[in-house]
Image (tube, rainbow, N blue to C red):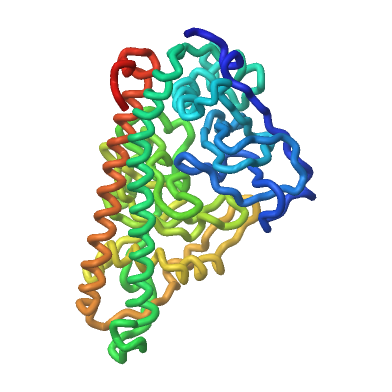
């Protein structure tokens, strides 16, 4: 069934209340200005408003209408729409199908007929989008369920990984801060040392915008750093470096990267440390000048222990004392070198801790790899299901 999106979907464009009505105490309605707090499928809410302008119902599809155009989430609650988003509701109430249908048609919405990428879209751009969908509501529901099963597994893996990360934090704190295995007191044979004594620091690649193009090489950037913690594979930027790369500017699996710049004024990313858990589909990974690679010296301490040390909240707090800048935040080069921690003189004492967290980090990496594979499957199925190349009408789901 060929039609305009406006024929089958109700569209509500956002309108921001005055900032005087905003609050962070959860008074009034949850409010989204853009896609900043979008998650895998559902957003989180940092801002609330006591004055309602444009309303979205629980279950509505929320789409960003300003760069980046086309980010999609589903609101789990009634909320207020800011000017950077709109809400979409299928007239037949088949919201799950609408979510995946829009995933398929977003590239069409993002580009004009001449191929130029939109910086924003308006109501007419959205309602006039031409779509071709199955006429049968039952077929629509089956397509959605088919894809939902993949997303459900991805979300389950994400939940497992969040739990595993929490285990790493709790276990590492017990050993390295609370000294629980040693009677809850600092052992006599432990000494305070600086991070510079046990690790080396390497600067990233200074790139030009013209170098960003289709490539088997990708570059890790601060876009890989989730504001709430975690390493996002969709943050990689494909690049064809024009300058000779240093060996130290390449990244291997389980290397630790620390964010040295931040575009968020709340310093949500700067000083965060993340392990590179996957290279995705790329042959090689390098890292940008916005990051610093931290590698253990002399093999006395493992990559995983270094990651656990740097992912401790004490390291983040330490880094915040070395931040400067206004529009763009920068971390002083001294921050890493001057961070101090107590460690045993004989680091083999930490082997039981190392073994535990190594296994946990590897399990996290396995789940990320599985999710990456599931995303590929979903992306290959989506156009075939939408076009009818795969017919689900006779399949029981």
Q: Specify whether residue 304 is in view.
A: yes
Q: Is residue 33 above or below residue 117?
A: below
Q: Quadrant of residue 31?
A: top right
- Residue occupying the point 52% across, 36% down: 73
Residue 355's spot in the image, x, y percent?
Answer: 21, 67
Residue 267's spot in the image, x, y percent?
Answer: 57, 57
Q: Nearer the viewer, residue 386 or 193?
A: 386
Q: Is residue 384 above or below residue 103?
A: above
Residue 204's spot in the image, x, y percent?
Answer: 40, 50
- Residue occupying the point 37% across, 70% down: 170
Q: Is residue 180 above or below residue 394?
A: below
- Residue occupying the point 48% across, 56% down: 260
Q: Specify whether residue 293 is in view.
A: no
Residue 58's spot in the image, x, y percent?
Answer: 58, 38
Q: Nearer the viewer, residue 47 or 209?
A: 47
Relative placement, left or right, of 216 versus 206 is left
Relative placement, left or right, of 345 versus 24 is left
Relative placement, left or right, of 296 versus 325 is left
């Amino acid at each position: 069934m060929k039609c305009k999106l406006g024929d089958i979907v109700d569209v509500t464009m956002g309108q921001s209340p005055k900032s005087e009505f905003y609050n962070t105490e959860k008074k009034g309605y949850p409010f989204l200005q853009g896609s900043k707090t979008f998650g895998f499928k559902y957003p989180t809410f940092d801002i609330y408003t006591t004055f309602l302008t444009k309303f979205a119902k629980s279950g509505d599809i929320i789409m960003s209408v300003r760069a980046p155009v086309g980010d999609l989430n589903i609101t789990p609650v009634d909320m207020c729409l800011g000017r950077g988003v709109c809400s979409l509701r299928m007239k037949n109430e088949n919201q799950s199908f609408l979510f995946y249908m829009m995933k398929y048609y977003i590239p069409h919405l993002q580009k004009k007929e001449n191929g130029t990428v939109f910086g924003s879209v308006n109501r007419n751009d959205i309602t006039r989008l031409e779509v071709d969908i199955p006429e049968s509501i039952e077929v629509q529901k089956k397509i959605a369920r088919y894809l939902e099963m993949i997303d459900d597994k991805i979300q389950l893996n994400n939940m497992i990984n969040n739990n595993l990360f929490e285990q790493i934090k709790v276990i590492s704190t017990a050993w390295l801060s609370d000294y629980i295995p040693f009677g809850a007191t600092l052992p006599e044979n432990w000494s305070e040392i600086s991070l510079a004594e046990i690790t080396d620091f390497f600067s990233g690649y200074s790139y030009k915008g013209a170098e960003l193009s289709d490539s088997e090489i990708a570059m890790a950037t601060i876009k890989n750093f989730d504001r709430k913690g975690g390493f996002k594979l969709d943050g990689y930027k494909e690049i064809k470096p024009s300058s000779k790369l240093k060996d130290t500017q390449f990244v291997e699996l389980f290397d630790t990267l620390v964010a040295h710049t931040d575009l968020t004024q709340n310093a949500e990313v700067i000083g965060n440390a993340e392990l590179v858990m996957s290279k995705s589909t790329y042959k090689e990974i390098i890292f940008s000048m916005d990051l610093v690679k931290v590698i253990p010296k002399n093999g006395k301490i493992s990559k995983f222990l270094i990651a656990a040390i740097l992912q401790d909240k004490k390291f983040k707090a330490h880094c915040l004392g070395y931040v400067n800048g206004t529009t763009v935040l920068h971390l002083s080069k001294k921050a890493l070198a001057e961070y101090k921690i107590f460690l045993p003189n004989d680091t083999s004492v930490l082997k039981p801790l190392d073994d535990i967290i190594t296994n946990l980090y590897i399990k996290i990496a396995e789940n990320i790899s599985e999710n990456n594979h599931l995303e590929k499957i979903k992306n290959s199925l989506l156009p075939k299901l939408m076009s009818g190349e795969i017919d689900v009408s006779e399949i029981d789901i």
